[in-house]
Image (cartoon, helix red, strand yellow):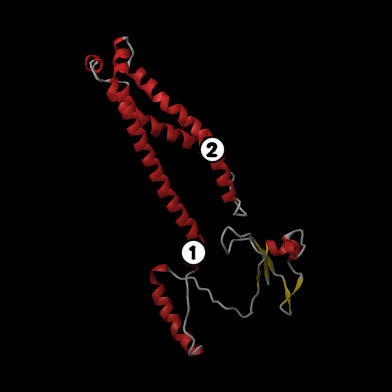
């Protein structure tokens, strides 16, 4: 029999080499350990690597074959003939191991797709709201913009002044969202026995992206108002 490292530790062998050559009773049979293999994941990464024994000659429910994906139909048809000869009346029920393995992550993939869709929709709606609010603000402060230009303010200075009023609450919102997001991500990662730690750079980059999106949404309207001639803005009613 072959053991994996997890089973070797379960059997109290300090090193994998110590298990080689030892006698183990398995399902009523006395077997010799001929080797220890590295741990590998048979199931989802949400499960720890389980102790595993590979025993030669014991009955099994499955037979595994490695085939080329482009001609698997021909291989299955070739296997069906001897199968029907040796096991008449028992149809072949087969599946592909890679597909079986990937099915374990279907829920996570679906969750990721739905989460990404709603994230995009939230950012899009928020950008539209900022765009509309910036238009209204620029409309309300039209005369102020004209007076500032007459007094010598530059276009960039006016844009930064008006956009700064929006950036401050956005920064505050990020400071509130970061710890909450970290807590949610950390709780989700805890469902995996093998997982990464949450990198703080994720929140910094996300915050910068939000600020850039907000600045572009706001500055597009404030820039339009700032570039209007003072003669037109001062007579604005």
Closer mark to the observer between disc 1 and disc 2 = 2
Q: Identify which residue, 20 or 231, lies in the foreground.
A: 231
Label 1 and label 2: CA atoms lie apart by 32 Å
The numbered mark, 1 or 2, whose residue comes first in the sequence reads: 1
Asked whether residue 2 is in view, the answer is yes
* Helix, strand or loop for disc 1: helix
Q: Name the mark on residue 63.
A: none
Quarter of the image where the N terminus is located: bottom right
| Residue at figure coordinates x 42%, y 45% from the top left | 119
Q: Residues within 10 Å of mark 1 (few under 14, many from 20)?
A: few
Residue 98's x, y, as percent? 48, 65
- Which residue in the protein does label 2 denote? 178
Q: Name the mark on residue 103.
A: 1
Kindly indicate whether the residue at mark 2 contacts the one at mark 1 (C-beta within 8 angstroms). no
Q: Is residue 102 left or right of residue 216?
A: right
| Residue at figure coordinates x 75%, y 73% from the top left | 24
Q: Identify which residue, 135 or 167, lies in the foreground.
A: 135
Height in image: 120 above or below 94?
above
Q: Identify which residue, 224 or 199, lies in the foreground.
A: 224
Asked which quadrant contains residue 38, the reply is bottom right
Q: Residue furthest front?
A: 237
* Helix, strand or loop for disc 2: helix
Asked which quadrant contains residue 33, the reply is bottom right
| Residue at figure coordinates x 59%, y 78% from the top left | 60
Residue 210's x, y, as percent? 43, 35
Height in image: 173 above or below 5?
above
Residue 124's x, y, as percent? 36, 41
């Amino acid at each position: 029999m072959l053991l994996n490292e997890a089973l070797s530790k379960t059997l109290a062998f300090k090193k994998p080499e110590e298990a080689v050559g030892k006698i183990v009773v398995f399902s009523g049979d006395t077997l010799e350990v001929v080797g220890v293999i590295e741990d590998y994941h048979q199931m989802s990464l949400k499960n720890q690597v389980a102790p595993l024994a590979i025993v030669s000659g014991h009955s099994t429910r499955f037979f595994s074959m490695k085939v080329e994906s482009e001609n698997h139909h021909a291989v299955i048809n070739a296997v069906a003939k001897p199968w029907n000869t040796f096991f008449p009346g028992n149809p072949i029920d087969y599946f592909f191991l890679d597909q079986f393995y990937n099915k374990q992550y279907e829920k996570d993939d679906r969750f990721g797709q739905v989460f990404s869709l709603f994230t995009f929709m939230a950012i899009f709606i928020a950008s539209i709201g900022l765009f509309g609010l910036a238009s209204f603000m620029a409309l309300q402060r039209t005369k102020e913009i004209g007076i500032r230009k007459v007094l010598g303010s530059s276009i960039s200075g006016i844009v930064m002044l008006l956009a700064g009023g929006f950036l401050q609450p956005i920064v505050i919102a990020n400071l509130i969202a970061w710890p909450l997001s970290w807590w949610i991500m950390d709780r989700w990662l805890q469902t995996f026995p093998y997982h990464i730690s949450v990198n703080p750079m994720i929140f910094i980059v996300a915050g910068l992206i939000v600020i850039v999106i907000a600045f572009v949404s706001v500055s597009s309207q404030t820039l339009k108002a700032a570039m209007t001639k003072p003669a037109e803005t001062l007579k604005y009613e």
